[in-house]
């Protein structure tokens, strides 16, 4: 085991940070010496520093923690950077969600035009972060889960084709956990085959090593007849899991990524959305308030026993990837990588999300060895073309390409609406987006 790892968390002010740090500290195959909390907003970073220090003292972890807004202090000589930055924060997420909804379109963090608005901010922020990391820790691994991930990964593929980066999303694990909880399977026995773009993919099979069979067909039948077992306390996630069944009623041959509902059932979801109170509001009233309340408890030395942060499944996922690199374990994860023939009947010059082995050299994609069906391929081709146009718009400062990307987005029925939303987004994203002309 490599001794004394140094890890930096970029976007450390996020409410996910305690879960990630605890996952890191509880992992028995990682020896962590130092965790550096990096954020561009001092107040958020200071708050998180207080919380993390409390959690560490409480359980007597031997580790050095620091928080900083200075990239040199944050990244110099680190082994890993975990990036979870959210350019523009929840305030801008709220815009991404609410503006399309005003026009009767999907308002979502990573899907539809909200996702595109976020993408044009996020590429800017992420590529800038990569530059900084590269300056101070040219050899480190970047574990990235900055959204929207296919677009971020595509911008990295173009600008830094040889970067030591793993682009990963926890959604497939989220789906699998949900299924296991609902129907009593154990994911540890599973070898899933999945393909697509990020938040836009399909399972082909789920081989269960204990049961010696592909369990996907029976899972589909169970979901169709019983639905998933939904106990999510967060309303928007509860709704998503309840609706998951609908996707299978229409298209019963593969388990889909839940995010496909935004494309395939956009009208119904818009109808069910509250235009004045979206997921961003839910998080500002939940996760973000909880940070402030926790800091107050620690500072006043009050109700400390009610502080309930623990290692999270999101955290474990990233940390398991980290351990698979460091200990050269060749574990399998769904990772976002350049296609280069892995999905043989899909274009090469794109990034896709597929199973990969993770070892000291990074992600080794597993090629699928079957043709993906036309229905999936057609959906993915339109989606990836619109995302690539958006990346073109970003690098070329092209209004025209942005308009094409917005028009081709599959949540958008026509060019006029696409243009209206684009023009409104340009105004609210001033200072975040590149100038488009
Ligand atoms: C999943 C997705 C992430 C997404 C998150 C949203 O984990 O894979 O990409 O950002 O859900 O969660 P939130 O609680 O911020 O709505
Ligand atoms: Mn994701």
Image (cartoon, helix red, strand yellow):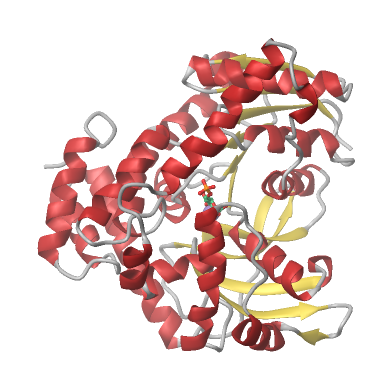
- In the displayed structure image, the side of residue 70 where residue 274 appears, left or right: left
Quadrant that contains the C terminus: top left
Residue at screen point 52% across, 14% down:
70
Q: Nearer the viewer, residue 186 or 143?
A: 186
- In the displayed structure image, the side of residue 261 where residue 227 appears, left or right: right
Residue at screen point 32% across, 51% down:
114
Quadrant that contains the N terminus: top right
In percent of width and height, residue 357 lies at: 71, 60
Q: Nearer the viewer, residue 212 or 153?
A: 212
- In the displayed structure image, the side of residue 86 where residue 313 appears, left or right: right
- In the displayed structure image, the side of residue 265 where residue 190 appears, left or right: right
One can see residue 340 in this view: no
Residue at screen point 62% across, 37% down:
16
The answer to whether 98 is drawn above or below residue 32 in the figure is below
One can see residue 182 in this view: yes
Q: Nearer the viewer, residue 105 or 369?
A: 105
Residue at screen point 41% across, 53% down:
110
Q: Quadrant of residue 191?
A: bottom right
In percent of width and height, residue 297 lies at: 68, 18
Q: Quadrant of residue 126?
A: top left
The answer to whether 181 is drawn above or below residue 247 in the figure is above
In percent of width and height, residue 279 lies at: 44, 48
**Residue lying farthest to the front in this orientation:** 303
């Amino acid at each position: 085991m490599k001794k004394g790892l140094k890890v930096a968390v970029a976007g450390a002010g996020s409410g996910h940070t305690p879960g990630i740090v605890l996952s890191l500290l509880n992992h028995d195959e990682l020896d962590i010496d130092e965790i550096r909390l990096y954020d561009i907003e001092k107040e958020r970073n200071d708050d998180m520093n207080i919380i993390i220090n409390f959690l560490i003292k409480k359980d007597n972890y031997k580790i050095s923690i620091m928080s900083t807004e200075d990239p040199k202090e944050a990244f110099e000589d680190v082994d890993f950077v975990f990036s979870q930055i959210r350019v523009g924060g929840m305030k801008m997420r709220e815009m991404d969600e609410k503006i399309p909804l005003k026009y009767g379109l999907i308002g979502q963090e990573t899907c539809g035009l909200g996702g595109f608005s976020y993408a044009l901010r996020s590429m800017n922020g992420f590529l800038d972060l990569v530059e900084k990391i590269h300056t101070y820790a040219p050899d480190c691994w970047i574990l990235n889960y900055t959204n929207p991930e296919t677009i971020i990964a595509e911008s990295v593929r173009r600008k830094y084709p040889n970067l030591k980066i793993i682009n990963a999303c926890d959604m497939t694990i989220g789906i699998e956990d949900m299924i296991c909880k609902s129907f009593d399977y154990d994911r540890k026995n599973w070898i899933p085959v999945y393909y697509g773009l990020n938040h836009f993919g399909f399972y082909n099979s789920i081989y269960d090593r204990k049961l010696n069979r592909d369990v996907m067909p029976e899972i589909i039948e169970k979901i169709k007849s019983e639905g998933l077992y939904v106990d999510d306390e967060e309303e928007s996630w509860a709704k998503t899991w309840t609706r998951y069944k609908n996707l299978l009623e229409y298209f019963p041959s593969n388990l889909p990524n839940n995010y496909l509902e935004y494309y395939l059932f956009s009208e119904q979801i818009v109808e069910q959305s509250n235009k004045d109170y979206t997921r961003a509001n839910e998080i500002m009233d939940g996760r973000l308030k909880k940070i402030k309340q926790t800091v107050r408890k620690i500072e006043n030395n009050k109700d400390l026993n009610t502080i309930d942060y623990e290692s999270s499944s999101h955290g474990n996922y990233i940390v398991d990837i980290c351990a698979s690199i460091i200990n050269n374990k060749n574990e399998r994860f769904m990772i976002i990588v350049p296609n280069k023939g892995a999905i043989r009947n899909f274009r090469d010059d794109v990034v896709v999300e597929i199973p990969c082995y993770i070892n000291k050299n990074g992600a080794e994609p597993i090629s699928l060895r079957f043709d993906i069906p036309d229905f999936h391929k057609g959906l993915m081709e339109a989606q990836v073309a619109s995302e690539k146009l958006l990346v073109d718009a970003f690098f070329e400062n092209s209004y025209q390409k942005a308009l094409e990307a917005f028009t081709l987005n599959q949540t958008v029925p026509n060019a006029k609406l696409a243009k209206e939303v684009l023009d409104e987004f340009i105004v609210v994203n001033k200072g975040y987006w590149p100038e488009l002309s």
